[in-house]
Image (tube, rainbow, N blue to C red):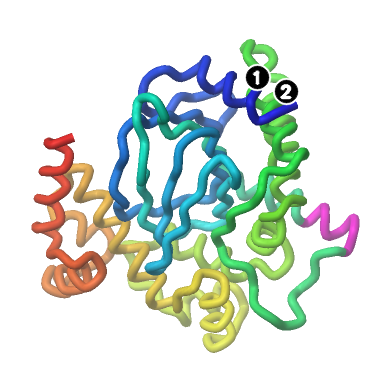
Amino acid sequence: MSKHQITQIVQARISGDGMVETGVKGVQLFRYSEPMRCAPAVVEPCVVAILGGVKEAILDGNSHVYDASRYMCCPMSMPIEAGIPQASADNPLLGVYIALDARVMTEMAIEMESASGAIRRPEGGALPQGFALAQWDDAFTEALLRLLQLETPTDLAVLGAGRLRELCYAVLTGEAGRSARRAYGVGNEVARAIAYLSTRLNEPVTIDDMAVQVGMSRAVLHRKFKQATTMSPIQFVKSMRLNKAAMKIAAGMSVSEAALDVGYVSPSQFSREFKRLYGQSPRQWSHAQHLSVGMG
């Protein structure tokens, strides 16, 4: 049982750059041999385990760099900027991406609370952020190794879901566990508000709408939202919409279409807020993205 064994398995299954399916739903291997500057993204609930190289995530202006010494756990959808500060053919970014299934994580978190009574509604103090970096421990390493050792279609079909559940349990009981349990167990109002927002980015969702959905007052939701995401609900909504729009523009959608797609009725307001966040107008940013792709 070792990280070295996991690295050998991943290296054997992926030779070129990109993402590769493992046969277990939501679990992918990845490899990138060139650096990528940070770009807007919306990270869906996931765990990212790095085996080689370095990855960077910028959340609300704060840079988080992580490598093989820590895995990243993002238990709720978050607007970030993601990039690869350094990578080469000799030292590529290599790792495993595990999507977190909300139903499975919720069931497990609630079962854990019922069994141990360890997780209760917070009496006070700050909630953990919706983005955590955690040290690899033996339980996480063993669970990831057992998951990636599945190879045959029969093994994957019969054992895949169970081994993935073991990995999720290792996350819930590990260093990132408090953050993950808060997102899926008792006291998960912020995560539920974000889930509600994520499916309505093209609609005029207000703080009051989110507060009603999770049964909180506007003031309490605002305070807990800031504690969990470092952003106010208004800042969060704006970042989610602008990051989604930036991703659509980078994928080839026109600026006006991307703006409408994330709920902006006024093109001038979209351009103004986009420039305030990224330092360039949408068209300038789009042109710069195309140039960097062409040069790469």
Furthest toward the bottom, the residue is 219
Question: Which residue is rendered at x = 56% and y = 49% of the image?
Answer: 72
Q: Amino acid at mark 2?
A: Leu
Q: Look at label 1 and name its amino acid.
A: Leu
Q: Is 151 situated left or right of 97 in this image?
A: right
The answer to if 199 sits in the magenta stretch is no
Up-down relation of residue 139 to residue 260 (above or below): above
User: Badge 2 is on which residue?
Assistant: 159
Give the labeled residue for mark 1.
Answer: 156
- Image spot of residue 12 (x, y percent): 52, 15
Q: Provide residue 185's location: percent of width, then percent of height.
A: 72, 61
The relative height of residue 191 versus residue 103 in the rendered view (above or below) is: below
- Nearest the viewer among 288 and 243 is 288
Circle 1: is it few (<14), some (14-19), or many (20+) Cα within 10 Å? many
Q: Which mark is residue 129?
A: none
What span is in magenta? 110-117
At 23% from the left and 65% from the top, the residue drawn is: 278
